[in-house]
Amino acid sequence: MWSVLNGFLQGAALLGTANVKATTFATLASTAINVTTDYVSAYAQQIDEGKYPATDATVAIHMGGMEHLVQEAEALGVNTELPNFFLELAKRTAADGHADDSYAAMINQFRKPSN
């Protein structure tokens, strides 16, 4: 829940730099959140099977989007801690040999104890 809410807040902060109201963004964000629910079911099956076929996009593709988000946030003077956190997890996932797997392979990062 917090990841979803914080993602909305991050997006609202970014769009706020272009004077887009959070209420305007909320409609788009709600649509994106609803689309994401389809991934939850697909990823749950991959997690249970321990196999992560990239039927939508690879971790490497997601990393490219994350890197762009970080760059844009930095350029706009918006906090980058949240997207950098997700990017770091994706980099670790890729380093563990899952760059060409689906985003669901990120589960392995959450299974590891914190350092």
Image: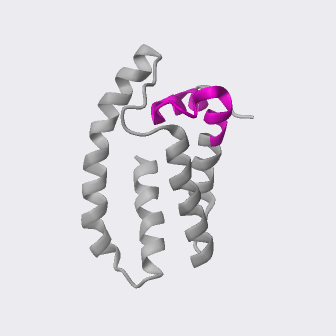
Residue 99 position within the rendered picture, expressed as x and y whole percent measured from the top left: 58, 34
Instruction: List the single residue furthest toward the bottom.
Output: 19
Residue 61 is situated, as x and y percent measured from the top left of the image, at 50, 45
Q: Is residue 105 magenta?
A: yes
Nearest to the observer: residue 100 or residue 74: 100
Q: Position of residue 18 (x, y in %)?
A: 43, 83
**Residue appearing at x 43%, y 66% in the figure:** 11
The number of numbered discs placed on residues in the rendered structure image is 0
Q: Which residue is located at x 36 percent, y 32 percent?
A: 55
Of all residues shown, which one is farthest toward the top?
Answer: 49
Quadrant occupied by the C terminus: top right
Quadrant of residue 49 within the rendered picture: top left
Q: Is residue 30 above or below residue 39?
A: below
Please indicate, yes or no, whether residue 7 appears anywhere in the rendered image: yes
* Residue 91 picture quarter: top right
Query: Which one is nearer the viewer's eye here, 18 or 6?
Result: 18
Check if residue 43 falls in the magenta segment: no
**Does the image show residue 113?**
no
In the image, what residue occupies the spot 58% across and 29% down? Answer: 98
Residue at image coords 28%, 74%: 23
The rendered magenta stretch, by its main secondary structure, is classed as helix
Residue lying furthest right: 115
In the image, residue 5 lies at what x, y percent?
Answer: 41, 55
What segment carries the magenta color?
91-110
Q: 52 above or below 77? A: above
